[in-house]
Image (cartoon, rainbow, N blue to C red):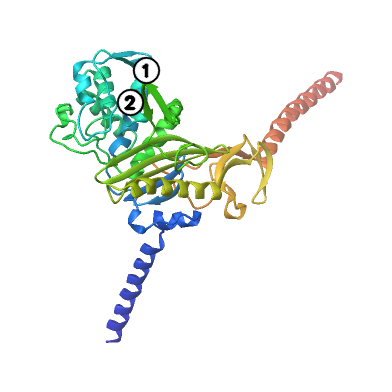
Amino acid sequence: MKKLSLLIMVFFLCYLSINFNSVSAKTPVDESKEEHVQLDKTFNPKGMVVTTEDGQILYDYNKDKKVEPASTTKLMTMLVVYDDIKDKKVNLNDKVNITERYQKMSELPNLTTFPLKKGQTYTVEQLLKQAALNSSNAATLVLAEHIDGDVSQFTDRMNAKAKALGMNHTHFTNPSGADNHLIQPYEPKGYKNESTSHTTAHDMALLTNHLLREHPEVLNITKLKDDSQYHQKLHNTNLSLPHQSQQMKGVDGLKTGTSKEGYNLVLTTKRDHLRVNANIFNVQPYPSDQSEHARHKIANAITQEAFHKYAYRKVISKGEHTIDGKKYKVKKDLYDVVPKDKSKYHLKVSKDQHLYVQYDRQFIGKKHIPSVKVEESSHFFSGSFRVILGILGCILVGIIALIAIKVYKKL
């Protein structure tokens, strides 16, 4: 009986431990309170990840949970287009003639779009602006057809790119992010039996970081509050941009998304050489103006908290330094994202002689902690001395040999 009682107590303590750990992790709404943002818990997103541009995770919540990306899908569309521009397959100034088919795409009901009229001509850059600012679904379909001649082929490339980036829980069904049933009869024929795309906050963070690293010029578009084409206004749906209703310092992108699953936002902000990317998905309820604003309030708050806690700085300069009681020659300056509270991190040297900053942290994908090569000063000098001694030894042997020869001749 005592053994049974003890066993029950152990299981009870384990149960308490598991439940304590599960509730101790702060939800995005709770985390936002650190920045004095008060929201009802019903606005908690389904998934969220906040990272640095190097992929260091500053905050995550259900990062691997399946979510619907909606129009944030357009970030992958833009990545494929910018890759094609880099490969000289297409140019930002290339002109696209609007056909009757393209006009009808822009007239589909129940979708965000920008009016296209037969006979008009737009550049690739203008269509990218329509997709990024106005979240035009038609613009993405037009771009896909213009570049590949077939939306299915373009969508295949989107999925191939996702796989290459390690977005292992992502599948796109079209370049717009809309439900395929809503874009009929223009949905990709190879995906006509599928409806919506799916991803995770973690996967979208991989996409966001890659897009900004490889094509920072995308910010020239996403930072725009508005634009004008054919006397029609384009308005950016990102309310966190400067001069918008939820404005926050340093915001310059990237993309919103909305579906029946809720409100999404991929936000990027840069201050004092530190860029923070927030990926938030499926804020409910939908439809709701409050939910739409809540996605920005939550993303803003947790981004603000990241800037309050972390900084990008030169941790150590190139040259001679004493680390853990040993002298090292640091080969070059080390820059890293570190807590502003210096007591929370310290410098370490790895077995393979690399210097890095040690504190509890994780990275998305295959990213690693920044480091620089070092060499123990004692080893450096002993090595130098060995060379010098070797040279002196050779000289000494030579001198002795010469003396010996002279002595021998005299004999």
Q: Which of 138/217 is in front? A: 138
- Residue of label 1: 87
- State whether residue 401 is above or below residue 237: above
Q: Which residue lies furthest to the bottom in this view?
A: 1
Q: In the image, which disc is placed on residue 80? A: 2
Provide residue 104's location: percent of width, then percent of height: 19, 23
Provide residue 161's location: percent of width, then percent of height: 31, 30
Observer able to see residue 360 = yes
Measure the alpha-carbon separation of dots 1 and 2. Answer: 11 Å
Q: Which of 225/2 is in front? A: 225
The residue located at (40%, 31%) in the rendering is 211
Q: In the image, which disc is placed on residue 353? A: none
Q: Which residue lies furthest to the front in this view?
A: 231
Observer able to see residue 358 = no
The total number of labels drawn is: 2
Provide residue 175's location: percent of width, then percent of height: 26, 29
Question: Would residue 373 be found to the left or right of residue 187 on screen?
Answer: right
- Amino acid type at image mark 1: Asp
| Circle 1: element type | loop
